[in-house]
Amino acid sequence: MAAYLKEERQQLILETIQHDKKVTVTELSQRFGTSEVTIRRDLQELAASGQLIRAHRGALAARPAPPEPPVVRRMHLDRAIKEHIGHLATELIKDSDSIFIGSGSTTFFLATSLAGKKNLTVTTNAISIAHELSSSSEDITVVVVGGFLRKSELSLLGHIAELSLPEIRYDKIFMGMQAISVTDGLTTDHLPEVMTTRRIIENGRELIVLADHTKLGKTAAAFIAPIQVMHTLITDDQADADLIQEFRNAGIQILLAK
């Protein structure tokens, strides 16, 4: 079998993964007549440059995050899945907790599932969530941060929001995310929200991300934080098993909504 230069081998790996969408270390090792250690190194280098997604026992084709429609429209897309994720998230909330709920369509359904919780304090930067909670039980205290209104998300961002956030402490942060990747971390296509999201994460003790399977293994343009800031990922059982294993290998607790 002919020997391959590293650059040639990596280019062929990329061509294979673009065609098959998924490869394993064992298959590539046999194809190129080289050790699995070498193949793992190739995959790691290609993942670091964003050309593929490292997965358990192999790799997946890189998948850029699709553009997001406005939050009001997204509430009607895969609604049942988002409702199940939101409902599952409430199991992590105890009476007397202080929590932050970020903007988004999936987090909105968490807000709709909080009835019955006692002595809860909810901080949010989402007008839609604040409005939903305004008609909830009197046992829920709602705190809204100020800021610049991002109309498509009905969220409040910018330096005014960031200045108010250090005045508030919360036990758990429940946040949606446009794109999540083990190698590229938490990312978004909306640059103005990056600093506000970072400030939110810094002020909480535990970050819980709510994201359906379409958000996993994707990378958007603007980096928010590495995957290690996330404690728990709540997604649905349609998520790719290899991707889920990659998150678990990175130390992330996974909850799957049925």
Image (tube, rainbow, N blue to C red):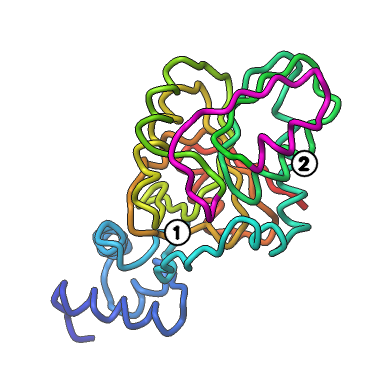
From what the image shows, is residue 4 above or below residue 88? Answer: below
The residue positioned 71% from the left and 53% from the top of the image is 82
Q: Nearer the viewer, residue 142 or 241?
A: 142
The residue positioned 71% from the left and 47% from the top of the image is 85
The residue positioned 28% from the left and 76% from the top of the image is 33
Q: Amino acid at mark 2?
A: His
Give the quadrant of the N terminus.
Answer: bottom left
Give the residue number, with chain letter if any, for mark 1.
55
* Mark 2 or 1, nearer chain start: 1
Q: Amino acid at mark 1?
A: Ala
Q: Start and end of the magenta stretch? A: 128-153
Label 2 Cα crowd, 10 Å radius (few <14 / some 14-19 / many 20+) = many
Q: Measuring from the top left, give residue 204's x and y in whole percent.
A: 49, 23
Q: CA distance from mark 2 to mark 1?
A: 29 Å
From what the image shows, is residue 13 above or below residue 78? Answer: below
Q: Measuring from the top left, give residue 246's x and y in whole percent.
A: 48, 51
The verdict on residue 130 being magenta is yes
Give the residue number, with chain letter if any, for mark 2.
87
Q: Measuring from the top left, give residue 207's x and y in whole percent.
A: 52, 32
- Badge 1 marks a residue whose secondary structure is strand
The verdict on residue 98 being magenta is no
127 with respect to 156 (left or right) = right
